[in-house]
Each structure stands twice: as C-alpha cells, then as structure tokens.
Amino acid sequence: MEERKLTEKESLEVITAMIARTKERYIGNGNILLMWGYLVVCVTILLWIMLATTQQNVWNWLWFAIPLIGFPVTIIMARKEQRENGVTTYSDKVTSRLWTIFGISELVLMLMCLGFSLFLNINCWASMLVYSCIGAPLAEIAQGIFLRENSLCAGGIVGLAVGLVTLCCVASGVVLNANWYLPLFIFGFVCMMIIPGHVINHKAKVNYKVKNI
C-alpha cells in the first residue's frame, strides 16, 4: 500500500500538535526548574553569610554542593517524569538536550577551573559565574521560544542581563565582591528559575481544573 504524503498544512498541524503536547506535559511539572532555582539560591545565601561573617574564601567550595546535589536529583526526577508521561517525543528530546548540553559543558568548565587552580595556581573561577549566567539563560530562552512559554523567555532575559553584567565586570577587572554581587546573582536565578517554575506549576493546576470541570 502506497503511503500518503502529508501536505504542508497537515505537516504544520502535526508539528503544532506535537509542540502543544510537549508543552502540556512540561507545563504540568516545573519541579525540576524549582529544584535548581531553590538549590542555587539557598547555597548562594549560605555562602554569602559565611563569607560575610568569617571573611574566609575557603567557603567558596560550597559552590560544589550545587552540582553534587543537583545532577543526581535531576536524573531521579527526570526518570520519574518519564515514567509518568510515557512516550518521549522529539520535542521532549530537543528540550532535554538543550539542558544536557549546558549541564555537561558546565561540569567540564568546573573541572577545568579546578585543574587551573590546583596545577597552575591560577584563579579562573569567575568564568563559572559568567558561564552559568549566560549559558543557562540562553538554554531557557530557547526552550521558552520552542514551547511558547513567556515566563521562561522573560526569566531567561533577566538572567542573561545578570550574566552580561558579570561578563563586563570580569573583563574590566571589577572585583565581584560578595556583598553586592551575590544578591545580584540570587536575583537572576529567582527570576530565571523560581518564578517561571511557580508560573508553570500554577498553569498546570489551572489546566487540571479546567479539564475536570
């Protein structure tokens, strides 16, 4: 039997429906975004307090708590969501790979900074702040555009603005003092992850109520 080719209109309808299904599932759970947002903010607040009270840079090692906690928890949560959602679509893979690429590159950069510090006695840890505040927002904006979710785009733009400020400071030699920079860093991640995460979960509750009326 000869297979019928889809017309351009039908192809667009299939793509639109696929994106809508992916968005509906994604909008149904902003918990991973919230987990990362609250993890980053809590660790940063703890780091800020310890640096302010002790004046000891050794507390900067607390940054490692973010990937050590975040990556394993993300894997567990992602597997749970996959079991609950069932089939993984192409759109799911695209959004997942966006964050996988960012996560792996962030881990590689962290190891490179550690190597520079241990073997060459060169401090390049500021590059982690720059990359975190530019790479993550770009991934979020791309995901927001793909899923047509304005809260992700808006949050990503705010986070990117913080990243560009960080880049300019590092490039011009401005010291990222904890007392002024860490509050800015926290603000960026609140706007980029915590607020969109709650917006996404709120939409999930509204959609659930509408479907069950």
Image (cartoon, grey):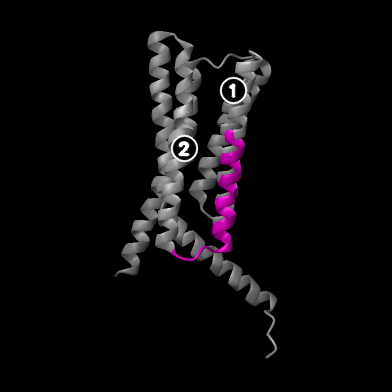
The part of the image, by quadrant, that contains residue 207 is bottom left
Q: Nearer the viewer, residue 33 or 207?
A: 33
Which range is magenta? Answer: 86-107
User: Which residue appears at 68% of the width and 85% of the height?
Assistant: 3
The part of the image, by quadrant, that contains residue 170 is top right
User: Which residue appears at 60% of the width and 37% of the height?
Assistant: 135
Question: Can residue 183 be seen here?
Answer: no
- Give the image location of residue 93, x and y in percent: 57, 57
Residue 198's disc number:
none
Q: CA distance from mark 1 to mark 2?
A: 29 Å
Above or below: residue 206 compared with residue 72: below
Residue 114's disc number:
1
Given the image, on which type of amino acid does mark 2 rest? Answer: Cys
Q: Magenta region's main secondary structure?
A: helix
Report the quarter where the C terminus lies.
Answer: bottom left
Outermost residue toward the front in this view:
119
Q: Residues within 10 Å of mark 2 (few under 14, many from 20)?
A: many
Q: Nearer the viewer, residue 124 or 202?
A: 124
